[in-house]
């Protein structure tokens, strides 16, 4: 399996670059969940990061790849994206 070093922004992993496995299309997953164990052995906390496009290169404006941004509210999309259902937040 191929992996790509991907930077993380925001949250506890801010500034870190971690290797992320790529899918069959060559892209990292849209949502990256990081389980953090509880110090007393309780239920682990799950940090959620969403994939966004990296800023374009300043000189040529080309796509540089992907970065992950911290999503403090978890997964706002909440489930599969069915084409026949209406998305939350859209009118």
Image (tube, rainbow, N blue to C red):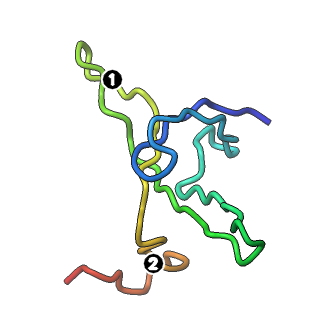
Viewer-nearest of discs 1 and 2: 1
Q: Is mark 1 on a helix, strand or loop?
A: loop
Mark closer to the chain start, 1 or 2: 1
- Estimate the x, y position of residue 14 in percent, counting from the top left: 45, 42
Above or below 50: residue 83: below
Give residue 29's mark: none
At 46% from the left and 46% from the top, the residue drawn is 68
Measured from the top left, where is residue 37 in percent x and y? Answer: 71, 64
Few, some or many residues within 10 Å of mark 2 (<14, 14–19, 20+):
few
Secondary structure of the residue carrying tag 2 is loop
- Disc 1: which residue: 62
Q: Residue at x 63, y 57 (%)?
A: 34
Q: Name the image quarter holding the C terminus.
A: bottom left
Image point (63%, 42%), residue name: 25
Is 83 in front, or is 42?
42
In the rendered structure, find residue 83 and report the number of the disc placed on it. Answer: 2
């Amino acid at each position: 399996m191929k992996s790509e070093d991907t930077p993380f922004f925001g949250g506890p992993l801010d500034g870190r670059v971690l290797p992320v496995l790529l899918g069959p299309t060559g892209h990292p997953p849209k949502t990256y969940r990081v389980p953090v164990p509880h110090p007393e052995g309780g239920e682990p906390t799950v940090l959620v990061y969403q994939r966004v496009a990296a800023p374009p290169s300043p000189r040529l404006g080309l796509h540089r790849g992907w970065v992950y941004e911290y999503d403090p509210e978890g997964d706002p999309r909440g489930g599969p994206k069915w084409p026949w259902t209406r998305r939350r937040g859209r009118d």
